[in-house]
Amino acid sequence: MAEEKKLEVKDLRISFKTNNGKVQAVRDISFDLYKGETLAIVGESGSGKSVTSRAIMGILAGNAIKEGGKIIYGDKDLLKISEDEFHRIRGDKIAMIFQDPLSSLNPIMRIGQQLTEAMILKNKAARSESKKALGRMFNALDSKMKAAGVEDGREDLVKFKTFGAVHSKLQSEYTAAKDYAIEALANAENLVLRLENKAINGIAQDFAKFDHAAKGSISRFVVYEDAEELKKLLDTLKKEEAEAKKTKEYSHLISDLKRSAEIFTRAIEKDEPNTFTLAYYLAFVDKNIPEQPIAEMNEMTHKRIEVDYMDAFMEKAQKGVEYSVKETNEARKAAIKLLREKVSVLEKENPDVKETKAAVKEMKDAVIKCLDPLEVAKDSETHTFATSIDYAVDFYFGGFKKNANEEKRYNKQKAKHDRLTASGKTPDWEVAMPSYINMDAAHKDMVDTVNDMIKHFEQQLKNNENADYPARTLEVVDYLKEQAELSVYKITKSVAKERAIKLMENVGIDNPRRRFRQYPFEFSGGMRQRIVIAIALTANPDILICDEPTTALDVTIQAQILELINDLKKQRNLSVIFITHDLGVVANMADRIAVMYAGKIVEYGTADDIFYDPAHPYTWALLSSVPDLDTKEKLASIPGTPPNMIYPPKGDAFAERNVYALEIDFEEQPPMFKISDTHYAATWLLHPDAPKLQKPEVITERIERMKRTRGNNDVREQ
Amino acid sequence: MSENNNDVLLKVEHLSMYFGRGKAVNKAVNDVSFDIKKGEVFGLVGESGCGKTTTGRTIIRLYDATAGSVYFKGERIVAGTGHYLDEIKELREKIKQLSSDSSDHSKEIDEAKERIAELKKEVSQAKKDHKNADRKLVNKIQMIYQDPIASLDPRMTIKEIVAEGLQIQGVKDKAYIEQQVIKMLETVGLVSEHATRYPHEFSGGQRQRIGIARAIIMKPELIIADEPISALDVSIRAQVINLLNDLCKSMGLTILFIAHDLSVVKYFSNRIGVMYYGNMVELAESDELFRHPLHPYTRSLLSAIPLPDPHTEKGRERIRYNPLTDHKYSTEKPEFREVCPGHFVRCTLEEFDEYVKKVQE
């Protein structure tokens, strides 16, 4: 199975501006997140785990500087998109669970309101979004089909579009009628109860309500076969009600109400019509709804679309797709040529501002032409090229001015400080160190952006040589269908409530209907964390970021919450980023683990790699400082504290606290050494010239023990 | 419990601590008994809200106990009157009933009255004991708090913080105080330069060390460590545990270690008491407890420990504890019984037999 990359973090660099200088919180980290996997990020506090997750969510503190790198989600670079664009991703696509369930719920809102609020708002936004996406794709396909010389393609597509309106009408008709039927049933039962107990004060109002609901329920898909009977029943009920007022005799009323209740029960239990396929049918085949039982109708309409209509349409659409791919390939070839030419302008020692900007403009225009409008999986590199290059160029040329300003400020403050000290005073403030922008890195970043683009285009051209056109066409059509469906999918308040209650059940809250109306203070810590998880799941996100979700909870509750997150991950095929400092927690959850220290990833591998074959001394130290149930000897603690990230160490950041440090560790930063296809670690110990070192005894012993117990288990299983 | 009283440092008898009164009474600690031997580390575990911290705070007299008593080195330092008052109430009602009865119960009534008089004496004795408990003795118990940030006054220097206890005790010799403070800071692995700094200048682990220095400067014999590592990072946890371990050996300290992290408690404690909703449900040597967990709550707690081993973790099955279905307390009240030497479980007689069989296997 080819795994789908959900999120890609590349060379991320984030700093914070403080009074004492620039704190380099995250330094050049890269990782990928695949669909349906859990990536755990482990490290001490201050190692940059939370900063990374906050950067992904776009909720960094105001003094953060995004110095470089990319966070690519879908077709967007999350570091560079606007706040408006982020609104569509945050919470909707990427959701987060925070550490403290106490402070992440609003104390004066009912739980139910907090759960449904986002659902309703997000649905509204999603509908208009899909409508736009549908229109865009539709127009693109239309123009390409025309260009490819397909006859009457236009007609088919227009049908494709009008179907949306038909569908929404059908759906609202059906849901409204069904809601009415449910309400009428409840009203009828209530009336029977009241009449039987002779509680008739103000019963006329209830009758009016029932009458209204019952009339509303008559529709093609709900009360249909029994519609005539129901109408008659309603008439007689009216007469009988008037009579009963005088005679105080209710038996007729009761029996008639019971009869109508039967009708409603039957109507509610009916099959649900497939409004989607039916809408196709109405739009393409026949304007009238066929006279068939609903199940048969569903089957018939389904067949009509998938087989009879789709085959013909697909053939036409494929021509459009083929044309489009060829066109973009030509554009790409042209773009590569242009980029190669123009990159020399940027590569100069001291590029000129005007010249560079002109070259960049040409490059951007050429790259934009390479966008295939019929591509469903968005080509993120091409999409983000314009913003990336603009950002890099601005950063580079702006850097000169910023560095000059910084220098000026530093000199001024230093002079003042010196003056004061010279006059014999001890000033109670210190001069903040200058934080210069690394101009070489900025220049390289600029050039690399272009070179990466060229490489990417070449790769794409290669991929397109043997393109599978039918598969691509199917993708396009599926996309159109999906967007058409989404654009008419409406979440009303009652639907939202039902969904919220289902979610609450999913996350293990008993009696959700009662809980729905309670306030956060009526929940215990574990229950609150469940609510927070439920809220995170309301918008059906792809990625769930858990920032130490169990640190504030105790062992039993922690185990429950971990199990819950694991179950939800499996059910919904979520990708999870799990941040923690407790390696024990991670063993249960993670598919892959990244160990972070001082803003860098020091080791990266599958859970088995990290626990059974740790390679970095920091991972050893982390593992051996956690006692397990058999630990007897003195715990190995990590001496000292993490380095001050205003002045990050020159060599390996962990060298000072590392008993296994080599001389080179203090001089030069180790690169990532590859241990196996999945396992990487940044330590000089893995260099072929390094002395062969044994892992600490605690760890080897524990691994041995774990292997033994596992062996026993395996034997038992057999 | 233990016959040999010589090496029992702290003895807790039927200790209860209720908050609120009337119908809204919250039984935070309900009839808890245990003893701590000299030089051992006694672990107290349970989920949040089960009364571990309240137990610790009642022992050190931060709360006035509702009932029961605590003996430290043989002297009663905490005495509650609840049990006596309850019994008096019962007896009075009994007298009322008996006297309203037609037949002659004068003998029983007299007996009851005598008992009431006795109990009243006990009550006044307990009140007196509680009020006049030897302050010097109570000072030999010190506490380390959970949150190293919140438990240090941000406006006092480290020297002031550490020396405060001595000053309150009336030590006036400044040179002596200074010398003691520096000695204590060095004992916990800080240096004398740190004495003039403020708490915000220290990292979490160092702050917890200051908390420990503040406790040991009083030369305590018993330290109540209330979740001292829960708020710390993994690597720093190990530092603090090692420090406590060393102090335990070098100063002959006895520690009541309150925590919810079972693997740490197992590593650190000689004996462990498991609490659930104000009751002590199981008490045993730590190895014994992990080898033969008897009470269903203990078993569920043990099954929830996360381990740094992916393979066992993935195959782990958590045991759920539901007190309503796991016990038949409606027919018989559970009591704290000794299943095998040194291993106590709160159970009914029926369960008791079952447990004894299990242990013998």
Image (spheres, rainbow, N blue to C red):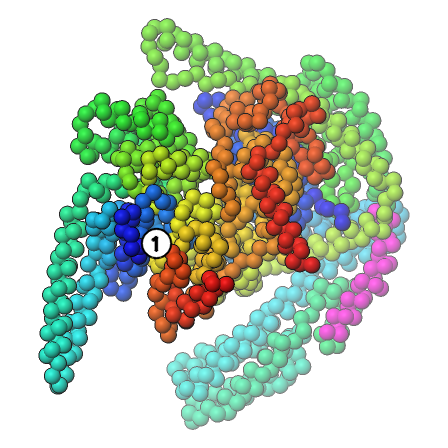
Inspect the magenta stretch and tell me whether residue A300 lies in it.
yes
Picture quadrant of residue B191: top left
The residue where tag 1 is placed is: B51
Q: Report whether residue A94 is seen.
A: no
Q: How many labels does the image show?
A: 1
Q: Which amino acid does the dot numbered 1 rest on?
A: Gly
* Whole-percent x, y for residue A177 in the image: 60, 72
Depth check, front residue: A189 or B66:
B66
- Residue A180, by quadrant, is bottom right
- Residue in the picture at 43% in, 16% down: A431
Whether residue A434 is in magenta: the answer is: no
Q: Write down the chain letter for disc 1.
A: B
Residue at 73% over, 42% down: A378
Q: Can residue B115 be seen in this view?
A: yes
How dense is the environment of label 1, judged by Cα within 10 Å: few (below 14), some, or many (20 and up)? Answer: many
> Eyeballing the image, is B218 above or below B311?
above
Instruction: Specify the quadrant of the image occupied by residue A685.
Output: top right
Element type at mark 1: loop
Taking depth in this image into account, of A183 and A461 the one nearest to the observer is: A461
Q: Give the range drawn in magenta.
A: A295-321
